[in-house]
Each structure stands twice: as C-alpha cells, then as structure tokens.
C-alpha cells in the first residue's frame, strides 16, 4: 500500500506547533485512517508573533529549529497555516466553470469585495455547492484573500529554520478537517478555535466548511485585562485568570480581576454567539447543532458553560485525535493531554497528505 506523510506547522502567538501525519491507501485506493506519527510544540518569546502575524521571522525560525531538533520530524517539507485579521474569508457565488478557470478569474471578480488591492493579495476559492439559477448554474463557496505580506512573513520564518514550505492553507479549513470525519456527516457544527489574539469560528455543514469568521480577540486579551486591573505582569495575570475562571465566586482581593475577566470573556462570547445567529438567519433550517472548542485559551474554567448558555447549544472541547490513530512516538509526548491545541497542525497535515 502506498503511503504519504506530511507535516503541518501552526505558528501561533505563544507557540509553534507541528504534527506529522501519515495516510496509507486502503482497499480500492481509498485512504485508510490517518496516523499521527509525531507532534510537538515550542514556546515563542513575547512579541515574536503579534496579532496572529509573524513580526520576527528569525526568532520564530529559531523556535521552529528547536522543535525539529526535539521531535526529529521525518521531513523538512511543511504546509503552513494562515489565519489572522489580514486574512479575509467571505461567502461568494460565482458562475459555474471548471475550478482552475474559476480560480484564475478571481482577480477580475473580487476586486470590489476585499479591502485590499487584488495585486497585494493571494486569492483562493473553496466550492461548497452549486444550484440552478436564472442564467445557468451557480457555484457557492468561500473566497479567501490573504495579504501577501502576511504569507511572506510566515514563509520567511519557515525558510530561516531550513525547512521547505510546500503549500499554504487556511487554518480554518484545517480545523474543519481535523474535527470532521464520517461521524459528523449529516450535522451542522460550529468549531471555535480560541487563540491568544485571534478566534476562528467555522461552521461545518455535512463535513464542508460553509462559513468562516476570524474574530480579532482571544485569550491573551482576557489576560491583558486582568493584568491591567491588578497591575501585575502578564505571566502572573495568566495564572490568576486560570485560577478564578469565569462566573465563579472569588475572594474580595480578586474582585477587580474577576470583573475585568468577566468583561473580556463576555465580549468574546457575544461575538461568537452573534456569528451563530447570523449564520442561522442566512441559512434557514440549517443552524449549528453543537459547538466544539479548541485552542490554547479554550479551557478557561466556566467558558464552555457560559457559551452554551448564551448560544443555547451543547458545547464541548474538540478531540482532533479522535479522527486519527496515534503512533507510539506521538503517544509518548504530552500531545494527548493537549490535543485541543493541535487541531490546526493535524488538519494542515491531513489535507496535504491526503
């Protein structure tokens, strides 16, 4: 049986994470269940990535080198994820045509739809369906426009580590890939990845991403709020945040911290809920049925319960390793306990290896 391996690299604000996935062809040429061969993460210095964008490529490159040395990945070929405030994702209907022609036509079709010049953006399109219209068949899908500077900064960091970036993928699509699978077919799910500075919301209907929203706020914003309220460094504020959680009673000396954390968390949850409401209004009869949380900030005590109450949907922590087998080398690391932080890197590798 033929097998393909690929490594997905997720560059976050506080960590770089990588996952190596192997896919073997099964009977009849169908791919067998993927295997996570190895995975790991390395902390990033403060400021190396700002607002989800690589600010110091050489610093990030050094961290990636350290990660490769620690985990002994089997290749230097990687697929990179992108997804920050400078990446635009919009629902777009286009006249039906072969996909290569459709993608080639994007610069002429979308110049009025994105807030950057077409020549400064990298464009892509994911078809999600089609329907008959008055003047012929129309393709529905998601337009992706990433500023070239954003992509170049990620590529520069990867190359400075001596690696070969073979492709770039939208982190939101990787998230859908990692948390999808046959068990989710026939359902509409909301996937919410809460990073340090960016929260990614993906609505997946019958296994296909149908809406993506990138919210410019995350767990670090809540930490910053606690830091300001208590006049303490960010590292101490992070500990306080995780200690008190959201919606719990606290000692009097932590009242200010609880109020600051409550305000920041409420704002984030309202933005997420509003995304669900918009999707339900624009897709009658197809509202999300459940929510899965991932990302480094998703395990704030009380967050899931509050989001469930606000959205009136069941909320649980996503299990991206539920769709893959885990090799012994990967199981020997802490990836199983921290799998909610590896959804993007696993999904990136799965897409490239398939």
Image (spheres, rainbow, N blue to C red):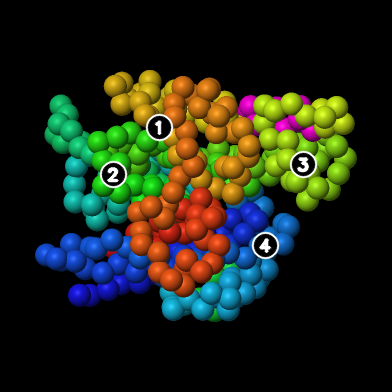
Q: Is residue 169 left or right of residue 57?
A: left
Query: As displayed, is residue 84 above or below residue 32?
Result: above
- The 10 Å Cα crowd at callout 3, few under 14, some 14 to 19, many 20 or more, is many
Residue 99 in percent (x, y) is at 23, 52
| Disc nearer the start of the sequence (2/4) | 4
Q: Earlier in the sequence, mark 3 or mark 4?
A: 4
Q: Position of residue 295 (x, y in %)?
A: 55, 48
Q: Which residue, given by chain and number where applicable, does mark 1 sit on? A: 290
Labels 2 and 3: the sequence-earlier one: 2
Judge depth for marks 2 and 4 and give the one in front: 2
Q: Is the C terminus in the top left, top right, bottom left or bottom right quadrant?
A: bottom left
Q: Please tell me how crowded label 1 is: few (under 14), some (14-19), or many (20+) other residues with Cα within 10 Å.
A: some
Residue count near mark 2 (Cα–Cα under 10 Å), binned few <14, some 14–19, many ≥20: few
Q: Which residue is mark 2?
A: 183
State whether residue 25 is above or below residue 91. below
* Magenta-tinted stretch: 256-267
Disc assigned to residue 44: 4
Asked if the stretch drawn in magenta spans residue 258, the answer is yes
Q: Is residue 239 left or right of residue 58?
A: right
State the SS at label 3: helix
The residue labelled by disc 3 is 240
Residue 142: image location, x then y, percent? 35, 42
Say what secondary structure mark 4 lies in. loop
> Between 162 and 174, which is closer to the camera in this rendering?
174
């Amino acid at each position: 049986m033929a097998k393909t391996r690929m490594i997905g690299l997720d560059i976050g604000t506080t960590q770089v994470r990588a996952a190596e996935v192997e896919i073997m062809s099964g009977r009849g040429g169908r791919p067998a269940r993927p295997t996570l061969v190895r995975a790991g993460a390395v902390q990033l210095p403060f400021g190396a990535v700002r607002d989800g964008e690589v600010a110091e490529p050489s610093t990030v490159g050094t961290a990636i080198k350290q990660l490769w040395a620690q985990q002994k990945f089997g290749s230097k070929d990687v697929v990179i994820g992108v997804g920050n405030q400078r990446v635009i994702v919009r629902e777009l209907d286009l006249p039906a045509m072969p996909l290569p022609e459709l993608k080639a036509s994007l610069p002429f079709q979308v110049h009025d739809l994105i807030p950057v010049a077409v020549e400064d953006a990298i464009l892509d399109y994911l078809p999600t369906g089609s329907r008959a219209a008055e003047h012929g068949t129309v393709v529905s899908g998601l337009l992706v426009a990433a500023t070239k500077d954003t992509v170049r900064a990620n590529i520069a960091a990867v190359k400075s580590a001596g690696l070969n970036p073979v492709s770039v993928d939208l982190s939101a699509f990787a998230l859908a890939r990692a948390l999808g699978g046959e068990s989710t077919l026939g359902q509409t799910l909301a996937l919410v990845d809460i990073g340090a500075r960016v929260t990614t919301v993906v609505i997946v209907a019958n296994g296909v991403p149908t809406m993506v929203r990138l919210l410019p706020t995350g767990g670090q914003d809540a930490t910053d709020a606690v830091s300001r309220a208590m006049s303490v460094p960010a590292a101490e504020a992070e500990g306080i945040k995780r200690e008190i959680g959201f919606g719990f009673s606290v000692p009097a000396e932590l009242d200010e911290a609880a109020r600051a954390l409550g305000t920041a968390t409420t704002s984030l949850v309202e933005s997420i809920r509003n995304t669900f409401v918009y999707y339900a209004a624009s897709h009658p009869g197809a509202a999300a049925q459940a929510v899965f949380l991932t990302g480094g900030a998703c395990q704030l005590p009380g967050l899931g319960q509050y989001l469930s109450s606000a959205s009136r949907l069941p909320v649980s922590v996503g299990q991206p390793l539920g769709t893959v087998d885990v090799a012994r080398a990967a199981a020997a690391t802490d990836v199983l306990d921290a799998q909610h932080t590896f959804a993007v890197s696993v999904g990136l590798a799965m897409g490239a290896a398939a």
